[in-house]
Image (cartoon, helix red, strand yellow):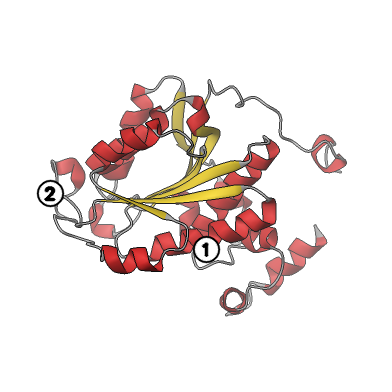
Amino acid sequence: MPVERILRRLTQLPGARTLWCRFPVGPLPLRVRFGISPRPHYAYGVYSAAELAANLRVPAISAIEFGVAGGRGLLALEGIADEVSRTLGVAIEVYGFDSGSGMPAPVDYRDLPYVWGQGYYAMDQHALRASLKTAQLIVGDVVETIPDFVRTPGIAPVGFVAFDLDYYSSTKAALRLFDGAPESHLPRVYCYFDDIMWPEIACHNEYTGELCAIREFNAEHPHSKVAPIHMFSHMRPHPAPWNEQMYVFHDYQHPLYCLNITPKDADHTQMPI
């Protein structure tokens, strides 16, 4: 695509993408493609989920943040969801899950107690609720709030989830979100895992933290998996660290999983010359 090639070169100039973020002109799909957002991982996940929903003719989805803390992420998610909804015509409900009192005590070594501890990332509930426009804040232990949420009628299918709970134990409990009936989620749910890369002292691996929770979830679920988007960074105009933090929950037995959503045009049905 000539436009993309030109933009790739222009946005390689020092400060170009920072300036574009400051003045976000241009169509939303193009800005999502080039990561022009204060939280490009949220923008990509929400837009991709809403686009999938539109292709499946699903009228509404839910976008979720686990680990709200001070609330900046949830406020950003709320704003992104609003713009994506207006662009694609898919209604987007936004939910934030948090204990409300900071992180609980670590359960064992898998929670990386040498990195995080009880009381970290407490929130000011009153101030945050006053700042939210449409997003709903769900306060409590995710061990208890997730089962109730999944059973609640009328909630739109989950399309995007940001996991920022730090601990293995909390992430493992949050992944129970995907144990709901097929109608509770899209066949593929875009996921962002915040705590699989930083900080360096965490020495992240598949036997501790969020990566351990993902590994165990996959071992326990033969017909669904949480997997990274293979070579995702190589498909982006400008690779970024967050590319390695994007995963997708695949529900292989979902009735819509195999529905073809590839556009039937020459770009997608003919071999390139």
Q: Nearer the viewer, residue 51 or 15?
A: 51
| Residue 95 screen position, x and y as percent | 42, 50
Q: Of the residues shown, which amino acid type is indicated by label 1?
A: Gly
Is 53 drawn above or below residue 14 in the view shown?
Answer: above
Q: Of the residues shown, which amino acid type is indicated by label 2?
A: Ala
Q: Residues within 10 Å of mark 2 (few under 14, many from 20)?
A: some
| Residue 239 screen position, x and y as percent | 55, 59
Say the numbered circle drawn on residue 105.
Answer: 2
Mark 2 vs 1, N-terminal side: 1
| Residue 220 screen position, x and y as percent | 34, 23
Question: Residue 13 vs residue 252: left or right?
Answer: right
Residue 237 seen in this snapshot: no
Say the numbered circle drawn on residue 187.
Answer: none
Is 17 drawn above or below residue 176 in the view shown?
Answer: below
Quarter of the image where one finds residue 147: top left
Which secondary structure lies at badge 1? helix
Which secondary structure lies at badge 2? loop
Question: Residue 147 vs residue 26: left or right?
Answer: left
Q: Which residue carries the number 1 mark?
A: 79
Q: Which residue sits at x=14%, y=46%?
A: 106
Quarter of the image where one finds residue 198: bottom left
Is 49 drawn above or below residue 38 in the view shown?
Answer: above
- Quadrant the C terminus occupies: top right
Q: Residues within 10 Å of mark 1 (few under 14, many from 20)?
A: some
- Nearer the viewer's eye, disc 2 or disc 1? 1
| Residue 73 screen position, x and y as percent | 41, 61
Q: Which residue sits at x=52%, y=63%?
A: 79
